[in-house]
Image: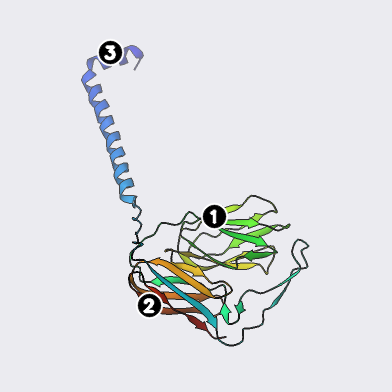
Amino acid sequence: MNLSSTRDWFVKDKGSCIFLFVLLLSLLSGCNHENKVAASADAHPAATPTTVDPATAATITGTVNLEGAPPKAKPIDMSNDPGCKGSGESEQVVVDNGHMANVLVYVKEGLGNASFAPPQQVVTIKQEGCRYVPHMAAVMIGQPVRFLDSDQTIHNIHPMPKQNGEWNQSQMPNSPPLDKSFSNPELMIPVKCNQHPWMHMYLSVLGNPFFAVTGNDGSFRLQGLPPGTYTIAAVQEKYGEKTATITVGPKDDKAVNFTYQP
């Protein structure tokens, strides 16, 4: 069909052309509508964060202890890297006067379907003296985690989670911070350095803000809790988990202690 005959057909069959044009627009509109419906069906609105009334918020405090003599810390030889400090000791079990450090304590059960927004406070993990500092850390889902290389040697940060994506990234001395976050709850994620086999730590990702890691005095504090009955768990890398059930009322301040045996 030449240009002249095409023009003649369009003039004679103008109504058919308009019909075809409207039909095409209708089909395109229908596809767009289906895409919007599909997108709407796939979308999951974020849960509204639970608000705890500060006038009724409760606190749980306590201490984690080790009964008996602690195991002798294993020595670590770092002399093969001049950028390290030369020696150290294992942090698998750290005890001071019977009190245990590096124990994760958190609310395991009792919050029901409550949801909590992650804090914007950055949790910093340093590579210092060819060690991870701190040795045990905890964050909420989505909370920013910052890795820093404070040593004059290259490090290789390698978390090995099961519920979050695994990654492995080198960090040079005096390089910019490495910022990460984790999307799923997971306890005791091992983090190692492929450059220095003795370097390792544990990072836990929690779905609520009620957690703490004990210091050298073995103490912990969980504050801002709504009144209720809770299962509190303590997790230590060598000795595992211990739990306790405790009920707190409005403005209560109660204590619960955990004791491990070597």
Task: Determine the residue located farthest toward the top in the rendered image.
Answer: 4
Q: Left or right: where does residue 49 sit relative to residue 83?
A: left
Q: Is residue 58 above or below residue 17?
A: below
Please indicate, yes or no, whether residue 150 appears anywhere in the rendered image: yes
| Image mark for residue 8 | 3
Tell me the residue at 24%/23% (across/down). Answer: 18
Q: Left or right: where does residue 191 sit relative to residue 114?
A: right
Asked which quadrant contains residue 200, the reply is: bottom right
| Image mark for residue 180 | 1
Can you give x and y, in whole percent of width and height, for residue 162 in the image? Answer: 50, 65
Name the residue carrying label 2: 246
| Image mark for residue 41 | none
Asked which quadrant contains residue 216, the reply is: bottom right
* Distance in Å between CA atoms under marks 3 and 1: 66 Å
Please state which amino acid type lies under the numbered disc 2.
Ile
Tell me the residue at 53%/55% (across/down). Answer: 122
